[in-house]
Image (cartoon, grey):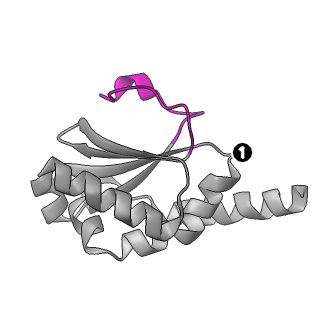
C-alpha cells in the first residue's frame, strides 16, 4: 500500500510540473474572461493523485481550459485565507471556479471524469 501511495505521489509531482502554468502562460482568452479553475489538493490525498491522472489531462485539452486555466493549490503550503472563497476548504480535491478573483462555484471531492465535467458544466451555465 505504501508503495502504491509513493508511486501515486511521484506521478502527481510529475504531472504537476507539466500542468502548472505561470500567469504569463495563460491564454489571451482566459485573461479576457478572468476565469480560473483552482484545484485544492494535499500531498497525502490519494484522490488528488487520481484526479490529476484521470481528470486533469482531459480538462487541459478541453475548450473550457482555454477560458479557465487549471491551477493546483497545495493546501499544506498555501495561504487559502488570502483567496476570496465563499467558505473554507474541508475536502480535497476541491475544484473552485473563480471569475475575477471571486468564487462562482465548487466541486467538492472526487466524482470521476464524467461526473466532474457534468458538474463543471452546471456551474458554468449558472454563472452566465
At 66% across and 46% down in the image, what residue appears?
A: 43
Spot occupied by residue 97 in the image (x, y as percentages of width and height): 30, 47
Query: Among all residues in the image, which is located at the extreme top?
Result: 81
Q: What's the magenta bit mostly, secondary-structure-wise?
A: loop
Query: Quick check: 110 left or right of 31?
Result: right
At 64% across and 54% down in the image, what residue appears?
A: 47
Nearest the camera: 30 or 127? 127
Nearest the camera: 128 or 24? 128
Residue holding disc 1: 44
Q: Is residue 69 visible?
A: no
* Quadrant housing residue 74: top right
The relative height of residue 104 versus residue 25 in the rendered view (above or below) is above
* Quadrant housing residue 3: bottom right
Which quadrant is home to the N terminus?
Answer: bottom right
At 39% across and 69% down in the image, what residue appears?
A: 59
Query: Quick check: 64 left or right of 39?
Result: left
Is residue 6 within the magenta segment? no
SS label for mark 1:
loop
Is residue 81 within the magenta segment? yes
Q: Count the labels in the image.
A: 1
Spot occupied by residue 116 in the image (x, y as percentages of width and height): 43, 61
The relative height of residue 124 versus residue 94 in the rendered view (above or below) is below
Q: Is residue 122 visible?
A: yes
Spot occupied by residue 123 in the image (x, y as percentages of width and height): 27, 52
Spot occupied by residue 72 in the image (x, y as percentages of width and height): 47, 50
Magenta region, residue range: 74-92
Q: Label 1: few (<14), some or many (≥20) within 10 Å?
A: few
Query: Quick check: 24 left or right of 90?
Result: left
Amino acid at each position: 500500500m505504501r508503495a502504491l501511495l509513493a508511486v501515486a505521489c511521484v506521478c502527481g509531482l510529475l504531472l504537476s510540473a507539466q500542468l502548472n502554468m505561470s500567469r504569463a502562460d495563460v491564454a489571451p482568452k482566459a485573461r479576457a474572461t478572468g476565469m480560473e479553475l483552482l484545484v485544492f489538493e494535499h500531498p497525502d490525498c490519494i484522490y488528488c493523485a487520481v484526479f490529476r491522472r484521470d481528470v486533469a489531462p482531459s480538462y487541459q485539452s478541453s475548450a473550457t481550459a482555454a477560458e479557465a486555466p487549471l491551477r493546483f493549490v497545495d493546501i499544506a503550503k498555501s495561504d487559502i485565507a488570502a483567496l476570496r472563497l465563499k467558505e473554507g476548504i474541508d475536502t480535497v480535491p476541491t475544484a473552485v471556479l473563480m471569475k475575477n478573483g471571486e468564487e462562482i462555484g465548487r466541486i467538492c471531492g472526487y466524482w470521476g471524469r464524467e461526473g466532474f465535467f457534468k458538474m463543471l458544466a452546471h456551474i458554468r451555465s449558472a454563472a452566465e
